[in-house]
Amino acid sequence: MNNTALKDEILLQVEKPARYIGNEINAVMKDRNKVAVRFAMCFPDVYEIGMSHLGIQILYDMFNRREDVWCERVYSPWTDLDKIMRQEKIPLFALESQDPVKNFDFLGITIQYEMCYTNILQILDLSQIPLLASERTQDDPIVIGGGPCTYNPEPIAAFFDIFYIGEGETAYYQLIDLYKTVKNSGGSRKEFLLEAAKMPGMYVPMFYQTEYNEDGTIKAFYPIAEGVPETVRKEIVMDVTDTYYPEKPVVPFIKVTQDRVVLEIQRGCIRGCRFCQAGQIYRPVRERDVETLKEYAVKMLKNTGHEEISLSSLSSSDYSSLQELVNFLIEECARKKVNISLPSLRIDAFSLDVMSKVQDVRKSSLTFAPEAGSQRLRDVINKGLTEEVILQGAHDAFVGGWNRVKLYFMLGLPTETEEDIRGIADLCNEIAKLYYETIPKEERKGKIQIVASTSFFIPKPFTPFQWSPMNTKEDFIDKAYLTRSAIMTQLNQKSIKYNWHEADVSMLEGLLARGDRKLSEVLLKVYQKGCMFDAWGEMFKNDIWMETLEECGIDLSFYTTRERELDEILPWDFIDCGVTKTFLIREWEKAQNAQGSPNCRVQCQGCGATVFQGGVCYENQN
Amino acid sequence: MKIRIKFSKTGVMKFIGHLDMMRYFQKAIRRAEIDVTYTGGYSPHQVMSFAAPLGVGLESQGEYFDIEVNSMLNCEDLKQKLNSAMSDGIEILSVKILPDDAGNAMASVAAAKYKICFRKGYEPDGNWQQILQAFLEQDCIMVEKETKKSKKEFNLKPYLFSWEIIDNSVILTVDASSSGNIKPSLVFHAYAVSQELTLSEFALQVTRLETYTSKMEDGKQIFIPLDEIGYTA
């Protein structure tokens, strides 16, 4: 495979040419003349980020199991190559065959965060595919979007032919079959899309229309083609053990963000934190069988040669066979000299014991995510982590030899007061104080190091906070200063380091997260003015965004700081993710009274996910 | 047991840099389930020594690295196992056992042989072969070498061990030891300067043909390929 889409002169000019050559271990090669359907699977960010995404690896494996389909990968060319490709009019290509994406049948784009929306336009543009779905012809690939952001696809509706709502494992084969049938019978692009729109989980924006009230809110949203459903229910895999999993994931040559074997132990989360979108849209929790996971671990380590394995889930501590799995991995990995990384573990006796076995205590840090500084506010957001639990965990850790602690908080949560914010500083100080009280001076290995980080709260669709106003940028900045000065007045302030997130980009994320179809024009314009890689601090051009919002007559506050009425039609209301609006309203009201809700295993809260008839909802009912 | 491995690097693999090649082989050795020796500690790593880093964009027929194994069946078996774990463009050419007193690959390097040709469209006008021949035959070839801090002039000639011009390519053996590592492009840039030519950074296509160590024979220093000090079993 020595034919690259880019000639040597170009590859030698750009940073990290290995991003663009394919040829990695376990990359799937097929004969282009022997497949019926060619699928380009894209993560619209740079290679190192995109290659770290498990979802694409799962779907890549799933598609390529079919003999009649060749699925290849596409990532965003970095700005250096972007410039050359535009100058020389080189069409964007897929890594495996190095063939132009525009000649493919499908371009699938996973949409993981709002700030990649301009990168989607870059991908389409470099591929020489019309940016607007309405301008595409029979010769263009079908552009299909998936991933968490498709739970409110409206801001990017104009750029996609189809959104696949939910988990990819269930309906893609059927969609491919439909495509082949329509194509073989000489059917048109529109005929295919119309049939696809009738399939469960498929949202084809061109067959829906939005009407607006004078105040800018939605008056009505409805299908405009015969047979197209009013609501689209998410697709979900109920048996997460007996399904596709990539036993031979692609091994990149260059170091990528997630340069390790990733074992997805479960989907969903029982916790129900009220700010968290993932905790709602992936309901109900479904666990993978522990024996199967052990087999995957062994096979994947053998097939990749990776020197590290990591568990993936929203809350690993809630996986019911965690101890068995971790003990197996410790033994297996010690033999193979493989490192284990265990993110999203609650700090308790078990996790401390495990961590002391798998990592160097002196070099590692403890991570807590209280998210809010006071117990009252933690009850509002339903984060069931108490100060007592944090301090107990920290105490045990200090005794075990740790002296580095990371704490994550959010600013701008609903009902937040100055007192809650000061609570962040108090909590940090308490932890520092506890260290000095617990560890006698002669046993201390240096000072305690506490790093507190805050991000700004952004209300997301399908959470109980979807109606909540977001803070203004000025509020955010004031709150970050308040946090900082509150920390500065603490006795142990020298042991506490404070980081906070950018406010500008948070406002735009807020805009896009709960935006509607009117935002497509803004995205198109900012892209045409040169915005892309907005998630990369140094690339983000806030001035262009602000200027364009004004040009398009879009009021940022309408989408961000405005409180929505409970009976307002929200842009994403036509999507059914299992969790009902009644449940979300109930949780929103409980939040205002600082009332927590027990997790799924303690007591069912009637969220609606039982409709999928499995997972945690049916755990003890056999 | 110390093992020396020789491999070639061609095609798109020329775009993979030296550090990534090391990571690539660490993973390949795991995939091939070689019983390799690890260091101790919390993040154990394989005992591995690469001979001479190859720049991005260069191909090679003679790359080397050493590993240590706790056990193995025989050299041929190890070679086959490794080859089954390679990607297109990397081939294991030989596997040899090193004598206990052998220095590691990196410290052993004395010279390297390169084949250099001009990429299509970048050839100098006229009979460049003849001019280059004369240039290389000078007693003294002064070049400017830029270091991080300063530019200094030095005589390249003692570091050029042999050359041969065949058709459109030049076979050049130069010093590759840690004390006098010469990039073949440096020779061509000196030539270009002498002819008042500007040489594009993409003008040359370079392949390393072999990496040598040196030994004394009859009071004379001779170069032998790095794997010739090893043996197979």
Image (tube, coloured by chain):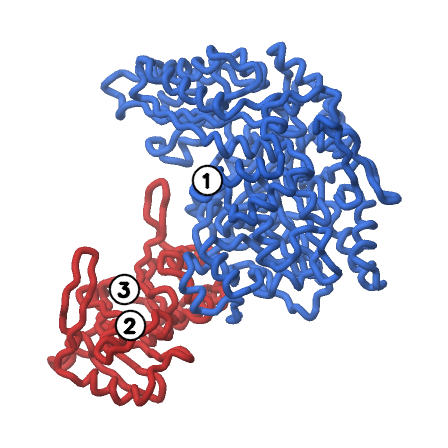
Rendered image: mark on residue B185: 2
Q: Residue at x 67, y 48 (%)?
A: A159
Residue where numbered disc 3 is placed: B105
Q: Position of residue B218 (x, y in %)?
A: 13, 82
Q: CA distance from mark 2 to mark 1?
A: 44 Å
Q: Residue at x 48, y 69 (%)?
A: A7
Q: Please, what secondary structure does the residue beneath circle 1 have?
A: strand
Parent chain of label 3:
B
Instruction: Answer with the quarter of the image where residue A618 lies.
Output: top right
A565 left or right of A8? right
Residue A354 lies, with reference to residue A478, above or below; the image says below
Q: CA distance from mark 1 to mark 3?
A: 32 Å
B202 left or right of A69? left
Mark 2 or 1, closer to the camera = 2
The residue positioned farthest toward the left in the image shown: B219
Q: Position of residue A433 (x, y in %)?
A: 34, 14
Q: Residue at x 56, y 47 (%)?
A: A527
Q: Residue at x 57, y 35 (%)?
A: A550
Q: Position of residue B19 (x, y in %)?
A: 36, 56
Residue where numbered disc 1 is placed: A340
Q: Is residue A402 visible?
A: no
* Crowd tier of the residue under label 3, counting other residues whose Cα lies within 10 Å: few below 14, some 14–19, many 20 or above: many
Q: Are marks 2 and 1 on the same chain?
A: no
Q: What color was chain A assigned in the picture?
A: blue
B13 left or right of A516? left
- Amino acid under disc 1: Ile
Q: Are marks 3 and 2 on the same chain?
A: yes
